[in-house]
Amino acid sequence: MSHSYHCRIYVTLRPSVLDPAGTAVQSGLQQLGYDSVSQVRIGKYIELTLEAPDEATASQQLDTMCDQLLANTVIENYCFEITALEGAVTP
């Protein structure tokens, strides 16, 4: 029996990596008068639905997916949230 999980994955650049896109956005916001904005970092947000026997297995699979494809672990960090979908059980 497996369950469906809604997964949210957040991928961000490591703090030591320069973020030219974040710098450009920060500059644009300041030009619009938002002088209180600082340290803008740009990342990725990914949502997916995953079938797994339990949440621990879903978490392990997500970790592997992020390491292999969804994040470049040399320059990016990632974290994720897993939510069980109500009533979504398959034999």
Image: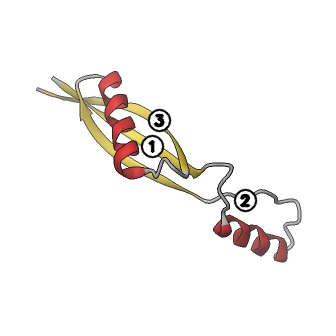
Q: Secondary structure at mark 3?
A: strand
Residue 54 spot, x, y in % from top left = 28, 22
Labelled pair 1, 3 in contact (Cβ < 8 Å): yes
Q: Residues within 10 Å of mark 1 (few under 14, many from 20)?
A: some
Q: Secondary structure at mark 2?
A: loop
Q: Label 3 belongs to which residue?
A: 81
Q: Residues within 10 Å of mark 3 (few under 14, many from 20)?
A: few
In space, the residues marked 1 and 3 are separated at their CA atoms by: 5 Å
Residue 9 or residue 70, whichever sits in front: 70
Labelled pair 2, 3 in contact (Cβ < 8 Å): no
Q: Label 2 belongs to which residue?
A: 40
Residue 33 spot, x, y in % from top left = 87, 72
Identify the residue at horizontal 31%, vertical 34% (top origin).
Answer: 61
Residue 85 visible here:
no
Q: Which mark is residue 8?
A: 1
Query: As drawn, is 46 to the left or to the right of 42?
Result: left
